[in-house]
Image: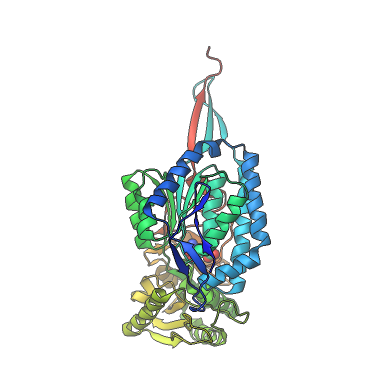
């Protein structure tokens, strides 16, 4: 099996490796990937610090060229990268290739942002004085990325960090080091100077903890669970470090009586079960008004019966495996909890076997759920959704907002009045009308409210808020 080392200060290093497993086929691991020690993580942080002044001062056209070159290689290799992604994470090949292509688009976009960096020029309130507002890189940025988007999330944190002149220490999720390694290899060969980008694959308790405790890291961008996010925030507060946290979701999809049934079913099935439901933007609460409720449930159940669950690389597969044993246990535990709470399991929920040894789970739909049940309140992060029946739009909106989370919120309706009201009243960072709650563009802000997010938005130009710091300079040119 091929061995993949960590990149620290421009060198590939490390001699302890762990197997990267394939959730579709536990007998065919993806490769061996290094596990960094705490000392290696410290070295990576120091290398990033040392590389920062020269990288921040590098002429924009050179930075642009490196990111552009990386974008081109990612795009050209999207099928191979997609296959690697689907092998290590388990989403279908079509989803894997789509995600790899998205990573290429993200680098392309941020290569352009390098050249668009600018500032503001204002007259002072005092005569004869000018004020310049400019942005500077933050310094050394720590990126901690989750397993469910093995290439897109590293890309959407790395590209803006590098574009705006920061140095990076990247710690990808332990379960999916493969795509992060491939991305770092591409960027390294595209010409990044030594130390500008360091890859420290390994355990959260070792590598992640070292990053949290290090005053050498000026900012941390994290995507993952709400519980881990809270630890990142606490450790960072002690060090007065900037944080950007993207955490859980319990996203509502409201379906009103006036919805087009086919659109509603499509949004629900896509949003709840595609990517095996392993998205913080997944629609896990389907809030349905009583006039359409029975027809909607019947149509969703029928569609679910047609979904093919199987090996991620099999072209017929629509729902790949669950990522690993502990996520499988969590999904099944919540399915049991839902039953105990009195919700009705209308479809699926059983572990199924296929030709290979993997974590295959039939997507599950609960009906007769209330918004007070644990299955309606806690993030499951699997292909499990519940239907909550409501009287009318007003009740639907109240239920949609009655959650500790606030990432994405969707509505299916043909009423302009309801759609418009919902866009304003939904307590979420993102609102989708006649679209699934999951699946976002790469060039506009991404993020949520309440327990879902903390700090400035990711993606698009808005990412500038996190990856740069503002300087206000006053000049009095007429003064001798
Ligand atoms: C999407 O829905 O297209 O972890 C992206 C997640 C999110 C990304 C979702 N940060 O699921």
208 and 160: which one is in front?
A: 208
Residue drawn at point x = 49 percent, y = 79 percent: 27
**Whole-percent x and y of residue 81?**
60, 65
Q: What is the count of numbered marks? A: 0
Q: Residue furthest front?
A: 15
**Whole-percent x and y of residue 380?**
40, 73
Q: Is residue 256 visible?
A: no
413 and 439: which one is in front?
A: 439
User: What colour scheme was applied to this rendering of the protein?
Assistant: rainbow
Residue drawn at point x = 56 percent, y = 15 percent: 478
90 and 427: which one is in front?
A: 90
**Whole-percent x and y of residue 361?**
47, 82
Q: Is residue 180 above or below residue 379?
A: above
Q: Is residue 185 above or below residue 264?
A: above
288 and 168: which one is in front?
A: 168
Q: Is residue 355 visible?
A: yes
Q: Residue furthest top?
A: 480
**Whole-percent x and y of residue 103?**
59, 59
């Amino acid at each position: 099996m091929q061995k993949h080392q960590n990149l620290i200060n421009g060198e590939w290093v490390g001699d302890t490796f762990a197997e990267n497993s394939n959730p579709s086929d536990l007998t065919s691991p993806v490769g061996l990937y290094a596990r960094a020690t705490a000392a290696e993580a410290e070295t990576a942080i120091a290398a990033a610090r040392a590389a920062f002044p020269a990288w921040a001062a590098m002429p924009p056209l050179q930075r642009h060229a490196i990111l552009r070159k990386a974008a081109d290689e990612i795009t050209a290799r999207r099928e191979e990268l997609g296959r690697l992604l689907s092998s290590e994470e388990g989403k279908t090949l079509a989803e894997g290739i789509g995600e790899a292509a998205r990573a290429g688009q993200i680098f392309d976009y941020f290569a352009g942002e390098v050249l668009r960096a600018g500032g503001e020029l204002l007259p002072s309130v005092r005569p004869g004085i000018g004020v310049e507002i400019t942005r500077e890189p933050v310094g050394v940025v720590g990126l901690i990325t989750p397993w469910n988007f093995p290439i897109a999330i590293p890309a959407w944190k790395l590209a803006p960090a590098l574009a705006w002149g920061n140095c990076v220490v990247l710690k990808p999720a332990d379960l999916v080091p493969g795509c992060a390694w491939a991305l770092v290899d591409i960027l390294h060969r595209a010409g990044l100077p030594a130390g500008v980008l360091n890859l420290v694959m390994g355990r959260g308790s070792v590598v992640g903890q070292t990053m949290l405790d290090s005053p050498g890291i000026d900012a941390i961008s994290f995507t993952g669970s709400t519980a881990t996010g809270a630890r990142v925030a606490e450790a960072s507060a002690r060090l007065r470090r900037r944080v950007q946290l993207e955490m859980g979701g319990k996203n509502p999809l409201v379906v009103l009586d006036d919805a087009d049934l086919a659109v509603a079913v499509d949004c629900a099935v896509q949003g709840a079960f595609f990517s095996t439901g392993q998205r913080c933007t997944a629609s896990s609460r389907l809030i349905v008004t009583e006039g359409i409720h029975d027809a909607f449930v019947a149509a969703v159940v029928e569609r679910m019966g047609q979904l093919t669950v199987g090996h991620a690389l099999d072209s017929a597969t629509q729902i790949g495996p669950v990522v690993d044993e502990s996520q499988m246990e969590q999904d099944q535990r919540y399915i049991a909890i839902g039953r105990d709470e009195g919700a009705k399991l209308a479809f699926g929920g059983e572990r199924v076997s296929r030709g290979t040894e993997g974590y295959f789970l039939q997507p599950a739909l609960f009906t007769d759920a209330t918004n007070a049940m644990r299955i309606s309140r806690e993030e499951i992060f699997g292909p499990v959704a519940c239907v909550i029946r409501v009287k009318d739009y007003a009740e639907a909106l109240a239920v949609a907002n009655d959650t500790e989370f606030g990432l994405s919120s969707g509505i299916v309706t043909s009423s302009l009045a309801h759609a418009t009201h919902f866009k304003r009243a939904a307590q979420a960072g993102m609102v989708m009308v006649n679209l699934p709650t999951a699946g976002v563009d790469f060039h506009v802000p991404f993020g949520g409210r309440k327990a879902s997010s903390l700090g400035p938005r990711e993606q698009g130009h808005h990412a500038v808020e996190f990856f740069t710091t503002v300087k206000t300079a006053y000049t009095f040119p007429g003064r001798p």
